[in-house]
Image: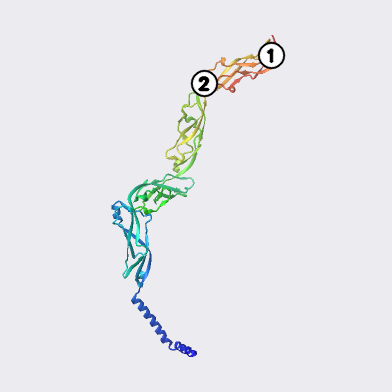
């Protein structure tokens, strides 16, 4: 019995097969026709449909605006549509609207979403959320300073001067709470390896007090750009002229003079046009006052900067001015040499009775000296009869260092005898 069934099935499959193939193709075509003509409705998930917030102009007219920091931007929408229309439905065909025109005061609101599909024979079946939370704040304007941040280093031998901005500040408008966090607008400019000046437009970034970049969408409208002019100058290191520096010090106390000046720094970096720098080998100081000083003093001196040149470290340097009294000298001839501290009952004979003396020192001490101020002697303390070679000494002279007294003879022969 079982074998008969198998034989019959085999015969049914292997006989009249062309006719059976035609029947199969016809059935498939009929199924496609039925499906096409009926166009069954099926759900379609449309992701990231942008929410359109309307009524912004009404808020602006009332001095209000939307705080955009936590504002929901998109939702997912399920659309019911005939299957043949699915290929035409995208996020651009689905409209989700949050109408803010009825809001008249700042605060937080729950706004109902209005969702529609702009395709025939399609409808909204489901939305991931039917409402959105909107925070409305006062609309304010703020003036924000603009700053340039130069990044990198120019080519060796060049210097980028302070950027020139088309605007030192910008005016932005937006929600009060958002704008109160903004402290400045900055633009980043790369100067790495440049050697030529430029004038270009740059987009600004808004920075909060902690240095974080704020998103540009917090501003109503767009963040302005700024035109920045970069002036690239040649750079050179030159010394401060040491040959004339002492002559630049004025108003030293009468009777005193400048004996040396030490500068810090001793050389400076200058910038300017290549032509201007080629003419400069050293920078001089302007005359500066010692303010009647009679001793060494640390002063501030100003550089005499040639036209068209800028000193990077500034126009002033420290000058340690060494001041000393003007030195004078007097010469006395034939100053008597005295024998002192001769013992009792003795007499002394000096082979040389006088010597020439030169006194050098500060002018105030030297110029008033007379012969009476210069006393020479040989000390006979403890000496008995005999012949001695003794040093010639000079008594101390007020205001004069001992090294400033020069005696024409170093020593003399003294003979001591009994009376």
Q: Position of residue 339 (x, y in %)?
A: 64, 14
The x, y position of residue 149, in whole percent, is 43, 48
- Which residue is at 42% across, 86% downward? 18
Side of 171 where 272 appears, left or right:
right
> Where in the figure is residue 70, as x and y percent of width and height?
38, 56
> Badge 2 local density, few (<14 within 10 Å), some, or many (20+)?
some
Instruction: Pick whichever, 116 or 335, lies toward us.
Output: 116
Task: Measuring from the top left, give residue 26's x and y in whole percent.
Answer: 38, 82
Q: Closest to the observer: 386 or 2? A: 2
Q: Residues within 10 Å of mark 1 (few under 14, many from 20)?
A: some
Residue corresponding to mark 1:
415
Q: Residue at x 36, y 80 (%)?
A: 30
Q: Is residue 214 above or below residue 114?
A: above
First in sequence: mark 2 vs mark 1: 2
- In this view of the protein, which residue sits in the foreground, 324 or 105? 105
Instruction: Choose top left, top right, bottom left or bottom right for residue 32.
Output: bottom left
Determine the residue located farthest toward the right in the rendered image: 386
Q: Helix, strand, or loop for circle 2?
A: helix
Quadrant location of the C terminus? Answer: top right
The image's mark for residue 364 is 2
Q: Return the mark for residue 305.
A: none
Extreme residue in the top direction: 419
- Residues at discs 2 and 1 in contact (Cβ within 8 Å): no
- Visible in this render: residue 415? yes
- Label 1 secondary element: strand
Residue visible at 53% across and 20% down? 365
Alpha carbons under labels 2 and 1: distance apart: 40 Å
Q: Quadrant of residue 233?
A: top left
The answer to whether residue 196 of the structure is visible from this angle is no
The total of numbered circles placed on residues is 2
- Quadrant of residue 119 within the rendered picture: bottom left
């Amino acid at each position: 019995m079982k074998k008969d069934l198998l034989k019959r099935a085999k015969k049914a499959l292997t006989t009249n097969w062309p006719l059976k193939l035609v029947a199969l193709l016809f059935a498939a075509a009929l199924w496609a026709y039925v499906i096409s003509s009926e166009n069954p409705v099926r759900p379609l998930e449309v992701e990231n449909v942008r929410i359109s917030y309307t009524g912004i102009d009404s808020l602006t007219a009332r001095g209000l605006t939307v705080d955009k920091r936590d504002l929901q931007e998109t939702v997912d929408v399920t659309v019911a549509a005939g299957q043949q229309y699915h290929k035409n439905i995208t996020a651009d065909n689905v409209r989700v609207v949050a109408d803010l025109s009825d809001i008249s005061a700042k605060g937080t609101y729950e706004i109902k979403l209005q969702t529609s599909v702009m395709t025939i024979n399609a409808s909204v079946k489901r939305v991931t959320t039917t409402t959105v939370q909107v925070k409305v704040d006062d609309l304010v304007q703020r003036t924000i300073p603009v700053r340039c941040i130069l990044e990198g280093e120019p080519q060796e031998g060049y210097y980028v001067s302070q950027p020139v901005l088309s605007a030192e500040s910008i005016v932005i408008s937006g929600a009060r709470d958002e704008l109160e966090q903004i402290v400045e607008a900055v633009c980043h400019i790369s100067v790495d390896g440049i050697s030529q000046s430029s004038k270009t437009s740059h987009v600004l970034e808004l920075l909060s007090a902690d240095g974080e970049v704020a998103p540009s969408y917090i501003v109503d409208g767009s963040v302005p750009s700024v035109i920045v002019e970069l002036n690239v100058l040649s750079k050179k290191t030159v010394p401060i002229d040491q040959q004339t520096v002492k002559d630049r010090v004025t108003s030293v106390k009468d009777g005193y003079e400048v004996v040396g000046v030490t500068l810090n720094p001793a050389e400076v970096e200058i910038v300017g046009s290549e032509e201007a720098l080629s003419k400069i080998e050293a920078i001089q100081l302007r005359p500066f006052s010692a303010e009647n000083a009679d001793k060494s003093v640390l002063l501030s001196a100003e550089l005499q900067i040639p036209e068209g040149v800028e000193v990077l470290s500034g126009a002033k340097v420290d000058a340690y001015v060494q001041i000393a009294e003007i030195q004078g000298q007097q010469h006395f001839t034939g100053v008597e040499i005295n024998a002192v501290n001769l013992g009792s009952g003795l007499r002394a004979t000096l082979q040389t009775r006088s010597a020439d003396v030169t006194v050098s020192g500060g002018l105030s001490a030297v110029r008033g000296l007379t012969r009476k101020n210069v006393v020479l002697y040989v000390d006979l303390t403890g000496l008995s009869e005999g012949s001695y070679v003794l040093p010639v000494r000079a008594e101390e002279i007020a205001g004069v260092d001992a090294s400033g007294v020069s005696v024409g003879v170093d020593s003399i022969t003294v003979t001591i005898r009994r009376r």
